[in-house]
Image (tube, rainbow, N blue to C red):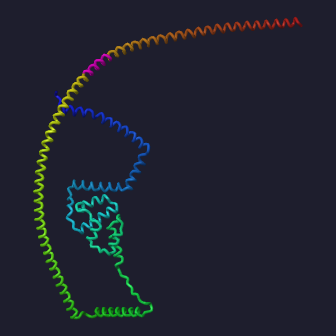
Amino acid sequence: PDLHPSSQASGGSASGRPSSRQSRRSSAGSGGSAISTDRASSGPDDAQSRVFLALKQRGDVEQLKAHLRKRLFEAIQQQQQLPKQQPPREMDDIDRAAATLVAEHLRTAGFPYSLSVFVPESGLSSGGLLDRNSLQELLRLPADGGFHRRLVAAPDGASVLRTVLQHLAEAGGGAGGVNAGVQTAESHPAEALLAARMAAIDSQFDQRARQQKRQPESSAASVEAALLQCRRETEERMRKQLQADMQRFREGELAKVRLEERVAMQKELEARRREMEAEYRLRFTRLVDREGSCDDALARQLKEQERECYLRRQTLLEQIDLAKERENQLRRDREAWEREQTVRQEQLRALDQSLVDRETKLKAGELLLETRLKDEVAKMKLSEETKYFQKWKELELQDARNKGAGLCNSAVAL
C-alpha cells in the first residue's frame, strides 16, 4: 500500500535491465579481449601505419587537419571575444558569377571541405550556383567567339575557371602582333616599290621629328593645342554632367519602382496575412478539439494503466512475502545443516586423532617387529653358517678318507 503503482512498475522494469547490460558488457569484454589478442598477434604498429597511409592517400588526414584548424580558430574567437565575421552582403550578378567560378573550380579540383566552407561564407547557399548557360548570358559571350567554342567543347567535369584562364593566356600571348600578308607574284616590282615608299615615309618622319626637337613650337601649334585642351575639358565636363543627370534619373526611377513594389508587396503581404490568420484560427480550433479528445483518451488510458499497475503491485507484494518466507525457511535449514556439520566435524576430528594415535602405535610395533626380525635373521644366519662349516669339514674328512681308501685299494691291486 505504501508503494505507487508507477513506481512499482518502473522499479520492476529497471530491476530487469542490469542483467542484460552486464551480459552485454561481459560479452563485449570477452570479444574485446579476443580482438586485442588478435591485434597484438598481428602487429599493431603495422596495422596503424597501413591505416594512416590509407587515410592520407584518400585525403582524410588533410580534411581532419583543416577541420581541427577551423574548430581551433572558432574556440579562440569565442574565448578572446574577437570580432565575428560580418554576414555576406547582397551579391550582384558579377559577384555571383565570380563566386560561381571559384566554387565550380573547387568542386572539380576535389576540394570538398574548402567548398563547404566557401559556399556559406560567399552567400551562394541562398541564391545557388549559376550554370554555364547563365554565365554565358551574364558575360555576353558571342556565340561565334573562340571562348564560346572552347567552353562548349570542354567536357562536363572540366573547370570553367581553368578554361577562362587558358583562353586569356592564349589571347594575351598572341596579342603582341598580327601577321598579315598580300598575295602577289614574286617577279612583280610592286614589292620593291612598296618597300621604297615605306623607307621614304620613315625618313620623312625621322627628319620632321629631328626638326621639331631642334625648333620651338610655333604660336599656331600652341593655340591649336590650347583649343584642343579646352575642347577636351568641355567634353569631359558635359560627359560628367550627363552621367550625373542619368544617375539622378536612374535613382529617381529606381526609388519610384521600389516604392510601387513596396506598396504592392505590403498589400500582398496583408492579404496573405489575413488568409493565414483565418487558416490559423481554423487549425487552432481543430487542434483544440483534437487536444481535448486526446486528453480524454489519455486519461482513460492512464486509469487503465494505474489499475493494471495496482494489480501487478499486489501480485509482486505476494511474491515478495512468499520469497521472504522461503528465505527464512532456507535460513533455518541452513543453520540446522551448519550445526550438523559442526558436530560431524568434531566427530571427524576425534576420529582423525584416534587414527593418528593408532598409526603411531602401529609404527612403533612395526619398528619393534622389524628389530626382532633382524635379530632372528642374524641368529639363523649364524647357525646356518655354523652348520654349513661343520658339513664342509665332514665332507673334506670323508673325501680324504675316500682318497686314502682308493689309494689302499690300488696298492693292494698292484
Taking 225 as reference, is 343 left or right? Answer: right
Q: Is residue 190 above or below residue 126?
A: below
Q: Quadrant of the C terminus?
A: top right
| Range shown magenta | 325-337
Left or right placement of residue 32 versus residue 295 in this view: right
Q: Residue furthest right?
A: 414
At horizontal 31% and vertical 56% (from top left) the residue drawn is: 66
Q: Position of residue 288 (x, y in %)?
A: 12, 45
Taking the magenta stretch, the answer to whether it contains residue 395 is: no
Q: Quadrant of residue 112?
A: bottom left
Q: Main secondary structure of the magenta part?
A: helix
Residue sitting at 28 percent across and 68 percent down?
133
Between 349 and 368, which is closer to the camera in this rendering?
Answer: 349
The picture places residue 15, in percent across and down from the top left corner, at 26, 32
Q: Is residue 393 above or below residue 73?
A: above
Say which of 31 and 100 sits in front: 100
Q: Pinpoint residue 132: horizontal percent, then vertical percent.
A: 30, 67
Front-most of residues 346 and 26: 26
Indicate the quadrant containing the N terminus: top left, top right, bottom left or bottom right: top left
Quarter of the view holding residue 146 = bottom left
The x and y percentages for residue 172 are 34, 76
In the rendered image, the vertical position of residue 169 relative to residue 64, given as above or below: below
Q: Residue at x 39, y 85 (%)?
A: 181
Count of marks, rendered view: 0
Relative height, residue 393 to residue 134 (above, below): above
Quadrant in the rendering for residue 307: top left
